[in-house]
Amino acid sequence: MTLKEKVELFIKDLENNIDENIPKVHSQFLNDYGWPEFDPLREEISRCLICDLCQAAITLTNHLLENFLKTMLIYNDNSGLGTTQDMRTAFKIGIEKYNDKGLVETIARAKRFGIITKEDGKILNQYREDFRNAYSHADKKKIFKDLKVPTQVLSLNKDLKYELGEPGDFDLSELPFVQGIAQSMLSKKSAFEYFIKVDGIIRYSLDTFGSKNRPKNNNV
């Protein structure tokens, strides 16, 4: 296949995917948060989903979630602020306190300070296992879980040549040679739901907690 043919096929796939996928994320794509800290990620994830780039959307949603929680924790921490503060150091203490924290602790602190609800905390901890740890850490057992695949490949020799036998069902997490395609297909079943749920949690938090804790420009 030539480069021109490859590009033409890519454009054709995009056209087909856009018509099908825009209705799925219409609201998330159209409606900004109004927070430049998070809107570029929301926009990019929406575009990935519209173009059917679902694995990219999952990994970016992982980043959006963790970035959102840490940023809100930093904004919530005003221990280093006096009556006025040099912007270059205004968030220094909060950044040092939360920047290197793992997601388990980040979610726990976000619940403690009311950034997210307890119920949302439970959901996000499950997402931490199913998406963040699975995809961002390439943990195949967490991606494929108990999924099985029929195959005739029963063994490999030292030259990595396949030896065939009677068909059988094998754990997908233990068969690297089929995981690339399988992971791409599996991501299409979960990427939209994952992003839409995280987006909803973020919007609720911004409307409640965020509106009270956002840095304000007193000159506006």
Image (spheres, rainbow, N blue to C red):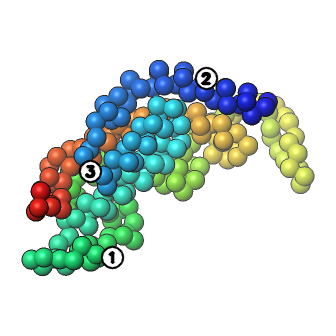
- Relative to 7, does residue 98 appear above or below in the rendering? below
User: Residue 206: horizontal and vertical position, in percent?
Assistant: 20, 49
What is the three-letter code of the residue carrying label 1? Glu
Camera-nearest residue between 91 and 3: 3
User: In the figure, is residue 206 to the left or right of 159?
Assistant: left
**For discs 3 and 1, the disc positioned in front in the rendered view:** 3
Q: Which residue is mark 1?
A: 96
- Taking the view exactly as shown, the residue that stands out farthest to the front is 219
**Res. 69 in view:** yes
- Relative to 209, does residue 81 appear above or below in the rendering? below
Q: Residue at x 52, y 32 (%)?
A: 52
Q: Earlier in the sequence, mark 1 or mark 2?
A: 2
What is the three-letter code of the residue carrying label 3? Trp
Disc 3 to disc 1: CB gap under 8 Å: no
Give the alpha-carbon distance from disc 1 to disc 2, as whole Å: 47 Å
Q: Which residue is mark 2?
A: 12
Judging from the image, what secondary structure is the residue with disc 3 in? loop
Give the alpha-carbon distance from disc 2 to disc 3, as whole Å: 34 Å
Judging from the image, what secondary structure is the residue with disc 2 in? helix
